[in-house]
Image (cartoon, rainbow, N blue to C red):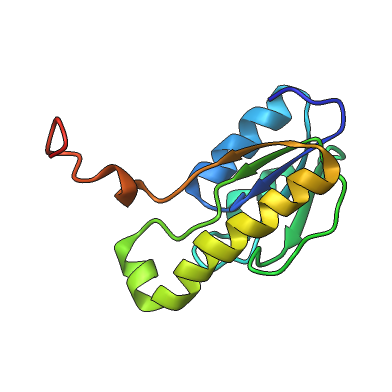
Amino acid sequence: MMTTGSTLVTGGAGFLGSHLCDRLIAAGQNVICADNYFTGSRSNVSQHLREPRFELLRHDITFPLYIEVDGIFNLACPASPIHYQHDPVQTTKTSVHGAINMLGLAKRTGSRILQASTSEVYGDPAEHPQA
């Protein structure tokens, strides 16, 4: 997803999101990282805090986000059973309301969006092929 404006990475301070931010910054992209730190950590993206092409927002995507972007990677969702079992309602809100809010942002801005999910939708990785 190459853009001339900004690319939003929700869940950007998580494991996968922070690595995606690394790659986008290395590719010369302007990156807006949004995370509520439910499972992510500011320290995962701290190396970019002085980078002029990087912006960090503490934001929970269960609430609308009104910004201008050209692309969205929606990676926001607790992926660890320990985390999503701790607060299953918040996990569900992130997956449902968060996806709706990011799709709304994509529609408003005319952005392309990649919607990701927790790995559990793919089933047991030890079982191949899946039943």
Residue at 68 percent across and 44 percent down: it is: 47
- Percent position of residue 8, x then y: 73, 44
Task: Using residue 58 as the reference point, say whether residue 98 is left or right of it.
Answer: left
Residue at 58 percent across and 51 percent down: it is: 44
Name the quadrant of the N terminus. top right
- Percent position of residue 17, x then y: 56, 44
Count the labels in the image: 0
- Percent position of residue 57, x then y: 76, 59
Using the rendered image of the protein, determine whether residue 49 is visible from the camera's viewpoint.
no
Residue at 84 percent across and 43 percent down: it is: 109
- Percent position of residue 83, x then y: 38, 68
Pick whichever, 41 or 12, lies toward us. Answer: 12
Name the quadrant of the C terminus. top left
The quadrant in which residue 87 appears is bottom left
Pick whichever, 126 or 31, lies toward us. Answer: 126
Using the rendered image of the protein, determine whether residue 95 is visible from the camera's viewpoint.
yes
Pick whichever, 6 or 28, lies toward us. Answer: 6
The quadrant in which residue 80 appears is bottom left
Residue at 38 percent across and 68 percent down: it is: 84
* 75 up-or-down from 42: above or below: above
* 31 up-or-down from 84: above or below: above
Task: Using residue 115 as the reference point, say whether residue 56 is left or right of it.
Answer: right
Task: Using residue 48 as the reference point, say whether residue 84 is left or right of it.
Answer: left
* 81 up-or-down from 52: above or below: below
